[in-house]
Image: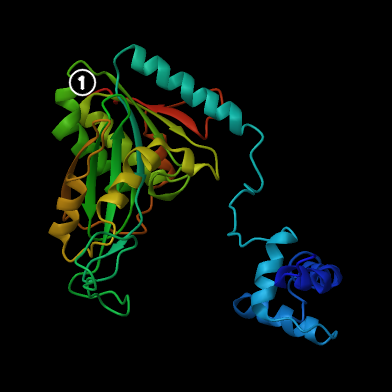
Amino acid sequence: MYRLTCRSVIRAPVISLSPQLRGQADDATVNRPFQSSLGGQCNWRCALAAALQAHGHAVSPNTVRKLLPELGYSRQANRKANDGRQHADRDAQFEHINAQVRAFQAEGQPVLSVDTKKKELVGNFANKGTDYRPERRPRRTEVHDFEKPQLGKVVPYGVYDVADNSGWVSVGITSDTAQFAVNAIRCWYAKMGRERYPAAQRVLITADCGGSNGARVRLWKRELQALADETGLSLTVCHYPPGTSKWNKIEHRLFCHITQTWRATPLTSRLAVVELIAATTTTTGLTVACELDTNTYEKGIKVTQADMAALNLHRDPFHPEWNYTIKPRPST
């Protein structure tokens, strides 16, 4: 005796429904996603069901939800995959940087990766991420992320020592300028680098192509010259090509771990920011030192052509705009 099940009864109309459902879904997602009559994604299944009902199908949004996976549809987030226009010598610059890193490390000279982390609001503001709390007792934070004048924002600038797996972070309270960036490197050398590399004569600095340490920032070069004169170190700089900042080692060796350390924790004060950064560690032995930089850094400082001519700047034959060395000037 043949047993008729509810599922077998449903499958027959589903077979005839599927082509129309696929057509409506393709129209909404592939063919004309912005001109589709189905409206926004928030009510997408209801809109699909309504469109099918208009064609005489007695179908509910729940049925649409069950059928979509059978037709090869699933909920998907955006994927950041299009790098856009790439420089022709992108890979060659990466190879140049790797060769420089290996050469400096073979001689026992420090190799640094530097960058500015995202500015952070100071106050009882919600921070991304989750953390364990007593059940039904979430941390209460401000509803609106409006900057508090008395607390402002902080600007963490990081210096990551590639060989030592250690980091220095200067937390600024004014502007992210080239003076601030170079002062962070100065602090790293005074507090960590001089002891770690007592015989250092050269330092390799890898940095992004833009920002306060950008390849076209004159003030960055002038301040590096001042640092070279103070320390007697030759400072070799290699910039990553435009659009490749995510490959800067400090991003995935230091900054991501700082973000994990303060996840779901409001940065209620400047002291809290410094303590959380300094508490960052990893199972691979990362250590971080942090200090508040209370200096005031002015924006818009002009560096003249005469100032640039006075620099002891030696450009590399390969992409001299990205690769150069600033040596100490002879004392007069």
Residue closer to the observer: 77 or 180: 77
Q: Position of residue 168 (x, y in %)?
A: 23, 40
Please tell me which residue is depicted at 21% across the width and 58% down the height of the picture.
296
Residue closer to the observer: 115 or 27: 27
Mark yes or no: residue 214 visible: yes
Please tell me which residue is depicted at 50% across the width and 34% down the height of the picture.
322
Q: Position of residue 309 (x, y in %)?
A: 42, 35
Kindly indicate the quadrant of the structure image that contains residue 294. bottom left
**Circle 1 residue:** 197
Q: Amino acid at mark 1?
A: Tyr
Mark yes or no: residue 32 visible: no
Residue closer to the observer: 208 or 33: 33
Residue closer to the observer: 78 or 60: 60
* 106 left or right, relative to 4: left
- Which residue in the rendered view is the most extreme toward the front? 1
- Label 1: few (<14), some (14–19) or many (≥20) C-alpha neighbours in 10 Å: few
Q: Position of residue 154 (x, y in %)?
A: 25, 60
Q: Position of residue 76 (x, y in %)?
A: 61, 59
**Quarter holding the C terminus?**
top left
